[in-house]
Amino acid sequence: MNKLQTPTEANSDKSQFELDRIVEQVSRTNNLKAIFLPVFDTINPYQEQLIEHLVDLGMQIEKGNPSNYLIPTVIKEGKPHILHLHWLHPLFVRSNWLKSLIRLTILITELYILRLMGVKIVWTAHNLKNHDSLYLKFDQICTRFIAKISHGIIAHSHTAKAEIIKTLDIKDRNKIFVVPHGNYIGYYDNNIGRVEARKKLNIPNQKIVMLLLGSIRSNKGVLELIEAFKRLKQEKVELLVAGKPANKEFEQLIKQKISEHENIQLKSGFVPDEEIQTYMNACDVVVFPYQEILTSGAVFLAMSFSKPCIAPRNCCLGEVLDHDGAFLYNSDCQDGLLQAMEYVINNQSKLINMGKHNLQLAEQFNWSKVADMTIKLYRNCLVKS
């Protein structure tokens, strides 16, 4: 030890040396390794696109299986710098409550062990509770635990960040990073026109078509949309609801609601990638009547297909969409959604230019930028104690 240094100063120099060494190490992207868990790249292009662009930047990404235990996975794949968690419910929800409780207990224990091993934990908060409302008490315990133990939390908007802080009572706000969702420009086929798309769906060309596309759940406001649409009483307008309902009971309820309305179609079932373009190119506007939402890849999908949108302004979507490309309404207003649909009918001549504007907005949210921001977040977590 330098005789002019105090023990405190020497320890400080040692800590700074260690910090500099870590910074130098993680600045070389090729050294970074992460495990993504769980991975749904066959049904959700978000992870596929993010992983592809992280790998392009030199990262090594392993895909974890939610059915496997974490510690054996780490031993098999080699210790990662980052464990990147996404949707949480597949990590512990099992066939009954007892199995789910046991799995949750093991998950919490494994995450503590991984932290002690020096693995940094990052969580992308796609939602704050599972959409199927399964074992919500366990879900709440898991979400709050992950939020507390994580070195970094990704929110897709500043509105989402504020909601995460409020709902989960986050004390260290600096560990929440806003990383936007990426677009889907060029990901899906887009080579059929409006006339051909409508012919496939048996929709007359003169109709104004409003589309709700994706998984059909109560939190997406589909029932509220149907009731508001009925009040339009416009023969020249058609509502198309396409996607897989949450369950048979909900599907039957929707069919009951639309049974006497020929201008409301339900196309029930999972929409394959190759059919996305048919629905998008057949419609004039895409509707997002969400009741609860933290982020939405479907909005970026609509924007990537040059479509104007209807969406609530008082949620995270208000940060992505603007009045030049969307009919934004106040979801707290009883007739807000109805008024937005009426605006669409009265401003039909503006729809094409609004869609073009949304495509220009979507181009700003490219995956290279998203991947670069994600790597910077990883580096930030690695220099944390």
Image (cartoon, rainbow, N blue to C red):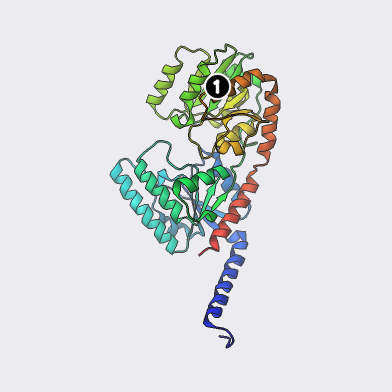
SS for callout 1: helix
Q: Quadrant of the N terminus?
A: bottom right
- State the residue lying farthest toward the front: 333
Q: Is residue 223 visible?
A: yes
Q: Is residue 382 above or below residue 304?
A: below
Q: Is residue 353 above or below residue 49?
A: above
Amino acid type, mark 1: Leu
- State the residue lying farthest toward the bottom: 3
Mark 1, other Cα within 10 Å: few <14 / some 14–19 / many ≥20: some
Q: Nearer the viewer, residue 62 or 319?
A: 319
Q: Is residue 157 visible?
A: no
- Which residue lies at the image location 58% right of the left edge and 42% below the top edge? 181
Mark 1 highlights which residue? Answer: 338
**In this image, 283 relative to 34: left or right?**
right
Percent of width and height locating residue 163: 50, 44
Percent of width and height locating residue 241: 51, 23
- State the residue lying farthest toward the left: 98
Q: Nearer the viewer, residue 199 or 227?
A: 227
**In this image, 31 relative to 251: left or right?**
right
Q: How many marks?
A: 1
- Which residue lies at the image location 35% right of the left edge and 43% below the top edge? 137
Percent of width and height locating residue 285: 61, 24
Q: Quadrant of residue 116?
A: bottom left
Q: Nearer the viewer, residue 89 or 177?
A: 177
Percent of width and height locating residue 139: 38, 44
- Which residue lies at the image location 61% right of the left edge and 15% below the top edge? 207
Q: Is residue 145 above or below residue 8?
A: above
